[in-house]
Amino acid sequence: MILMRRLKLTQRLKLIRHLFSIMFLCIYLYLMLLHREYPDKQSSYSLRAMNSDEYCHFKPSTDQFIRKYKPYLLTANLSNVKRVKPTIERIRNLLEIIRSKEDTYQLLLERFGVFDMTNPTASLKAYTDESNIDEIKTLYNRYIKLMPDNKTIHVDHTIIDYLKQISSYLSDGLENNRTNRFQVGCLRKPVFVLACDQSFFNGLQGAIRTLDTYWPDHKIAFYNLGITSDQEELLREKCKRCEIIKFPFSDIGKYALYFGTLKFYSFKPFVIQDALRRYGTIIYGDSSIRFKSNSFSPILIDNYIRGFAVRELPSRSLPCYTRTGTFDWFNQSYSQYGDIAMAETDLLVVTDTFLTRLIMKAWLTCALESECIMALGSQSKCRGSSSGRHRYDQGAMVTILTHFFFP
């Protein structure tokens, strides 16, 4: 009897040990799965940080990736989206407008690294080692061709599929639904670009202080729009990593007399273009900007595909803050843009890509044309609300972006 009890007790102890072993294994597996990092997780970017003495040999090649990408949701095909979209006709119209102005301004634009549409193969040049100029040329020659009359532009119909793919990839990222993700081996440090005249110098110092907090080891390019000699001396003393670049007002003023009037903001596209050709990837900020984090990596990675990142203002309709004359310059009607939101230009992330080359050429050309950037003699119009103050550089920029990005 005693032997039977001992046998049963031994069996129970074995069973308990077995159960504990199973429980321990389950807990271990749970913890392993809980803390595992999945390489395809959409919001996870694992990048090797670049020190100042390191060199990132990564040269982005996005063409094959974006054409083969399988969208989770094809944004451009949504039936309820009524906003103006990229079309062959709109892109052709924009490029033909740019071409019609090119002979007047190309001598100036060449100094800023802007290509010549009459000879894109020779004039499309790498800005930095990071620029994938071969891919930029390939995409340009695939989709855009200047006809023998030197006026008409042929736009290949497949560019629309290409633009749809880009917009779908970006939209999938917003919803964390990407079916694949562009792989980046290392990320070059962007250069921060600031610009102001003497009246905004105090604000500039605030912007630099926030960069000292969140981005202490990144280069700052400051464009001098008219600070005093004392202010420049103070800047050189307080900001050792700042490169001070004098903005060439006199050179550009030969083509547009209003360029020295900063309230028209025609200088901004030229500041961005000059910085882009020098550094390849830039983060532009007005002197009023205050940086509150250093989490730009996802934006910089997407910019290898997008090229141009802006902040939308959903509550502000583009026609409410853009004079009708600006739309007229683009051969567009303001009534087409009622559902397009204004975007800010006080903070821009710009990377050298095929699309960026087209966007910047159009924006620079507009800045040199008073009928486009200023649109004097016309007023902003919008339905359902009162019109606001004309946003010179912003209105032109957003109008251009609608030619290349789907809503």
Image (tube, rainbow, N blue to C red):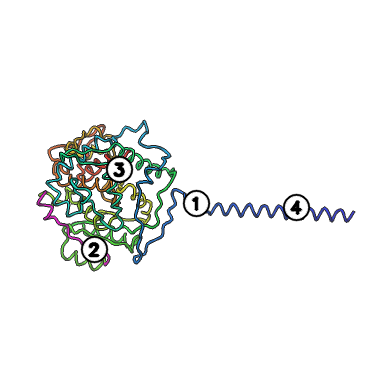
In space, the residues marked 4 and 1 are separated at their CA atoms by 36 Å
Mark toward the start of the polypeptide (1 vs 2): 1
Q: Which residues are magenta?
A: 240-255
* Res. 202 in view: yes
Residue 278 lies in the magenta-colored region: no
Mark 1 vs 3, N-terminal side: 1
Answer few, some or many: residues within 10 Å of disc 4's Cα (few below 14, many 20 plus, some between 14 and 19): few
Q: Which residue is mark 3?
A: 313
For residue 38, the mark is 1
User: Where does residue 196 sit, x and y in percent of width and height?
Assistant: 20, 56
The kind of residue tagged 4 is Leu
Q: Residue furthest top?
A: 79
Mark 4 or mark 3, which has the lower sequence index? 4
| Residue ID for mark 2 | 243
Residue 15 badge: 4
Q: Position of residue 169 (x, y in %)?
A: 38, 43
